[in-house]
Amino acid sequence: MKKLKKEEVKQEVFDLYDDYAHNKLQRREFIEKLSLYAVGGVTVASLMSFLMPNYKDTMLVDVNDPKLDSNYITYNSPKGGGEIKGLLSKPKTFKGKLGGIVVVHENRGLNPYIEDTARQAALAGFITLAPDALTPLGGYPGNDDEGRSMQRQRDRNEMLEDFIAAYEYLKGHKDCNGKIGVVGFCFGGWISNMMAVKLPDLAAAVPFYGGQPKEDIDKINAPLMLQFAGLDTRVNEGWPAYEEALKANDKTYEAFEYPNVNHGFHNTTTPRYDKEAAELAWFRTIMFFKRHL
């Protein structure tokens, strides 16, 4: 099978994958539309192989990194899904107490990429909790296709409560200084925005290409850092109205748009990943948390 390079693939293919990843296309319809781009020796199978996540070769932090204490825990989410599983990570050696970060997954549960991101944040000097909103359904199933199907079975406002409960768990943790931020991706970006609306004491929020709240923006107290992908018209179309509301309510925010990159550019596991944009966005994120946590 021909191994494709990113520059060989048309933008329309990435747009199709975005529709598929956000449940706008069923798998059969996705494959049918993809077949239109299987030309010149490129097969549907090679396009599918190119587009699907590769968890084996793309992790940035060793799961057994000796500098980290990283283990699964469960915490209670009485307004959400009950007992929720999450990955709790912190540096093994630290003095005093750490700022806390809730790391929120995309629309497919706690997959290896989000766990890897939570470990990265812990290595930067924070205590992090990455919950799995699929816990009430048995947890992340091991692949993103099933994970997306499962996550559609849950109410998104109940899932929001699961991440709010994660904030409360970190706030009460003996190694946390009580200052909690949130970073989330895609669905997790929406959760990050909504936690800023719902939690008056949230210390910072960094939504990556996340949907925007439509009301109660006046209730936001947390400083925001909003990360956008230049090619992500679906999410970006809601930003002007949100920014207008943030300005009207005199909220503290900064926003960055990374040109010529796709939704999901921070995710190392798919070809939408853009190393330069991802590293810059992550550097900005960590510096932002260091200022506020």
Image (spheres, rainbow, N blue to C red):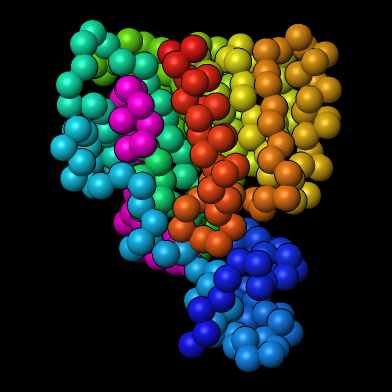
Q: Where in the figure is residue 96, as x and y percent of width and height?
A: 23, 8
- 186 vs 250: above or below: below
Tell me which corner region of the image, top left, top right, bottom left or bottom right, holds residue 241.
Answer: top right
Residue most extreme to the bottom: 41
- Magenta region, residue range: 119-148
Residue 212 at least partly seen = yes
- 86 vs 47: above or below: above
Tell me which corner region of the image, top left, top right, bottom left or bottom right, holds residue 34.
Answer: bottom right
Residue found 71% across the figure and 36% down from its top: 257
Residue found 80% across the figure and 15% down from its top: 247
Q: Where in the figure is residue 221, as x and y percent of width and height?
A: 61, 11
Q: Is residue 157 magenta?
A: no
Count of numbered circles on the image: 0
Residue found 64% across the figure and 41% down from its top: 209
Q: Where in the figure is residue 271, as x and y percent of width and height?
A: 55, 62
Residue found 20% across the figure and 41% down from its top: 65
Q: Is residue 141 magenta?
A: yes
- 73 vs 145: above or below: above
**In this view of the protein, which residue sits in the foreground, 82 or 93?**
93
Query: Along the horizontal axis of the image, is 288 left or right of 26?
Result: left
Residue 157 at least partly seen = no
Q: Where in the figure is residue 3, as x and y percent of width and height?
A: 51, 79
Tell me which corner region of the image, top left, top right, bottom left or bottom right, holds residue 99.
Answer: top left
| Quadrant placement of the C terminus | top left
